[in-house]
Image (cartoon, rainbow, N blue to C red):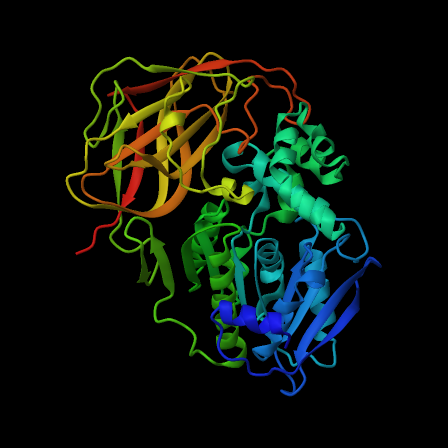
């Protein structure tokens, strides 16, 4: 093992290696049925004899520049096979992100099983795209997979592209930046990382959005326009939807996520789907964003412990309970048998006229007007996606809340501690002057100092097709789940606005297609909070005896 591999293994908190005599076979050709050849590297311990295999498939530079990961995995007593996806890092073909991974993955698995060193046992672990490639084959592989550990990802990529029905613009521009720079020179990679914020801003501000890739990177990605043209409900996304097949997944699964990862709503839906199918998945959720160092470290440790348990029969590294999650505010880890924990009860906190928030039903009041102008869109502040751009996840929202396009509703100081653990939703009664608008809702914690710190949020795109937009309707907004402890004396705050740009693509206020829209039309909507139209946020409150 190299010095770097030893250092990183210690940083990850891994057990002492089973072998330090690790070798590597580079650029193994994997011939696919359509004639395309992918390339793989195999890391293996020379002194341990036949070993089970951990398979990793990625479109990133892991195979070329992540060799120390292969050494670490091999040192733990496995073959580590790292395969580059189509059109990336030397593999043939053209990259068609997320939609190509099921067929290619099952073909790679068949190739693996034909290798003379394969001992019949294989598992998968890894984060982000490496987690998605696991979901892509999990159902089709059946019991050929001994275990899986998808991390920081969901099984349905269409949902991740269009959370709440609106395009997650900043996230996927950043992803394109990764793909654009990873195969360049070291200087190009460093400059690309330095200038990523500028690239994203240039692309997000370009209209039509279909030209965003050229504005940011000086090149066209065929998939960029395809994503925008498809929209949220198109058959285009079917090859990337593996959530519907989760009941057929038989491999023991350990899901790892972060409260500030933009995939956390989907990851928990995947966990629930496995539970509903009678499976017993494990779950770990920490206080992390997508690219947090601690997420990578604990993900490696938890994933390898899961592999050792199911591929080597060594359960010494497993904890006692299947669910472990971090409670924000309490700054403590909890363990339970299931998530959300037993006894959770939904509390409704109602929006009041005059900016109040409370448990009792609202009094009669006039609705609040809320104008959103796509030419000067309500900006995004803090939250999961921002951490990708090396910004803080939780920030003081007071300056943002002072804007005239943000409504704020604040509770009285809490009389006792409150723990919110699980999925969060809002029901917002609204009418608008046009049929096209968004509703953004954020939950914040107000500290005794007055700082308003974001906890979780979500956005729902509305297209009125049933009646007039001027008729009040209840819009249900799914916020990110959370596990948060609010101490007595703190206050809850709910923000309502018309967008969060560039986290989500701005609502143009017209029916022009997302890819080609250029017309900007301000839209006023009215938020209701009266007995007949009681807007509220729904909080899953943990009740512990």
**Vertical arrangement, residue 213 with respect to residue 20, above or below:** above
**Vertical arrangement, residue 544 with respect to residue 468, above or below:** below
The picture places residue 386, in percent across and down from the top left corner, at 50, 40
Frontmost residue, 129 versus 295? 295
Q: Residue at x 38, y 33 (%)?
A: 442
Name the image quarter holding residue 135: bottom right
**Lateral position of residue 375 relative to residue 278, left or right:** right
The picture places residue 106, in percent across and down from the top left corner, at 69, 63
**Vertical arrangement, residue 158 with respect to residue 214, above or below:** below
The picture places residue 495, in percent across and down from the top left corner, at 36, 28
* Image quadrant where one finds the N terminus: bottom right
The picture places residue 496, in percent across and down from the top left corner, at 38, 26
Frontmost residue, 215 versus 522? 215
Q: Is residue 339 visible?
A: no
Name the image quarter holding residue 320: bottom left
* Image quadrant where one finds the C terminus: bottom left
Q: Residue at x 64, y 74 (%)?
A: 2
Q: Residue at x 18, y 29 (%)?
A: 360
**Lateral position of residue 369 relative to residue 418, left or right:** right
Q: Is residue 120 visible?
A: yes
Q: How many numbered marks have been drawn onto this rendered protein structure?
A: 0
């Amino acid at each position: 093992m190299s010095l770097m591999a030893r250092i990183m293994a210690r940083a990850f908190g891994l057990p002492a290696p089973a072998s330090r005599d690790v070798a590597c076979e580079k650029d193994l050709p994997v011939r696919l049925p359509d004639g395309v050849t992918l390339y793989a590297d195999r890391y293996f311990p020379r002194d341990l004899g036949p070993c089970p295999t951990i398979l990793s498939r990625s479109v990133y530079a892991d195979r070329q520049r992540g060799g120390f990961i292969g050494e670490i995995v091999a040192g733990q007593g496995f073959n580590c096979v790292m395969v580059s996806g189509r059109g990336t890092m030397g593999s043939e073909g053209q990259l068609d992100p997320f939609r190509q991974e099921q067929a290619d993955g099952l073909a790679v698995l068949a190739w693996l099983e034909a290798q003379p060193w394969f001992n019949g046992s294989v598992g998968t672990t890894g984060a982000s795209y490496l987690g998605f490639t696991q979901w892509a084959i999990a159902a089709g592989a059946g019991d050929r997979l001994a275990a899986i550990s998808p991390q920081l990802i969901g099984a349905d990529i269409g949902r991740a592209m269009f959370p709440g029905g609106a395009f997650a613009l900043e996230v996927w521009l950043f992803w394109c930046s990764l793909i654009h720079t990873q195969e360049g020179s070291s200087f190009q990679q460093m400059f690309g990382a330095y200038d990523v914020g500028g690239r994203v801003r240039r692309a997000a501000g370009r209209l039509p959005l279909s030209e965003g890739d050229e504005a940011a990177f000086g090149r066209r990605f065929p998939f960029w326009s395809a994503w925008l043209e498809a929209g949220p409900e198109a058959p285009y996304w079917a090859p990337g939807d593996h959530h519907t097949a989760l009941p057929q997944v038989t491999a023991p699964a350990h899901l790892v996520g972060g409260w500030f990862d933009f995939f956390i709503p989907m990851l928990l839906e995947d966990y629930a789907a496995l539970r509903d199918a009678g499976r017993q998945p494990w779950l770990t959720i920490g206080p992390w964003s997508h690219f947090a160092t601690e997420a990578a470290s604990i993900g490696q440790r938890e994933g390898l412990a899961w592999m050792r348990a199911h591929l080597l029969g060594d359960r010494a590294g497993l904890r006692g309970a299947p669910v472990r999650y971090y409670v924000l505010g309490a700054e403590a880890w909890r363990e339970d048998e299931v998530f959300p924990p037993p006894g959770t009860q939904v509390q409704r906190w109602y929006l009041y006229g005059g900016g109040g928030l409370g448990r009792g039903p609202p009094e009669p009041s006039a609705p609040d007007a809320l104008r959103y102008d796509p030419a000067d869109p309500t900006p995004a502040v803090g939250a999961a996606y921002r951490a990708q751009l090396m910004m803080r996840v939780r920030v003081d929202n007071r300056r943002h809340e002072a804007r005239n396009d943000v409504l704020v509703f604040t509770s009285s100081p809490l009389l006792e501690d409150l723990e919110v653990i699980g999925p969060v939703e809002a029901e917002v009664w609204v009418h608008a002057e046009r049929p096209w608008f968004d509703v953004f809702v954020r939950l914040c914690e107000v500290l005794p100092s007055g700082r308003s710190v974001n906890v979780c949020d979500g956005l729902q795109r509305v297209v009125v097709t049933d009646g007039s937009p001027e008729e009040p309707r209840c819009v249900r907004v799914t916020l990110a789940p959370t596990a948060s402890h609010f101490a007595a004396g703190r206050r809850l705050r709910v923000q309502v606005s018309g967008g969060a740009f560039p986290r989500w693509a701005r609502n143009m206020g017209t029916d022009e297609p997302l890819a080609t829209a250029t017309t900007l039309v301000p839209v006023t909507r009215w938020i209701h909070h009266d007995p007949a139209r009681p807007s509220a946020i729904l909080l899953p409150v943990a009740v512990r005896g």
